Image (cartoon, helix red, strand yellow):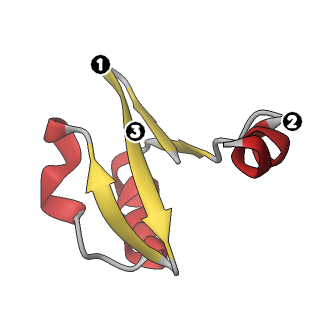
Amino acid sequence: MRVVGPNFIAGAVVREGRVVRAAPILGYVIGWPVERVIALARRRGWTIERDEPPADADAAADRG
C-alpha cells in the first residue's frame, strides 16, 4: 500500500491483513492490522492507495 500525506509518500507491505514492512516514517505501524492503518490515515487526512503488482509479476515468479 502507498500512504500519501501532505508532505510525504511512503510505502508499506501488507501480508495476511497486517503491515509487515514500512518506510521509516511509518515504521511504528509494523504489526498493525491494515484496518487500523486505514483509520489512522482517515483521522490524519492521508490517502491510502493500493499498490497493484505489475501485470506480468505472476508470470515472472513462475519463471524464476
Which quadrant: the C terminus? top right
Q: Secondary structure at mark 3?
A: strand
In the image, what residue type sits under mark 3? Gly
Which amino acid type is marked by label 1? Asn
Please indicate whether residue 28 sits to the left or right of residue 34 in the image.
left
Q: Label 1: which residue? A: 7
Q: Is residue 18 above or below residue 19?
A: below
Tell me where residue 39 appears, x and y as whole percent.
43, 69
Tell me the distance, in whole angstroms, between the alpha carbons under discs 2 and 1.
30 Å
Front residue of this view, candidates 41 and 61? 61
Residue visible at 21% across and 47% down? 26
Q: Secondary structure at mark 2?
A: loop
Describe residue 7's horizontal placement relative to residue 13 as left or right: left
Residue density around tag 3, few if under 14, some if 14–19, many if 20 or more, within 10 Å = some
| Front-lying residue, 10 or 5 | 10
Q: Which residue is mark 2?
A: 55
Q: Residues within 10 Å of mark 1 (few under 14, many from 20)?
A: few
Question: Quick check: 25 left or right of 17?
Answer: left
Nearest to N terminus: mark 2 or mark 3: 3
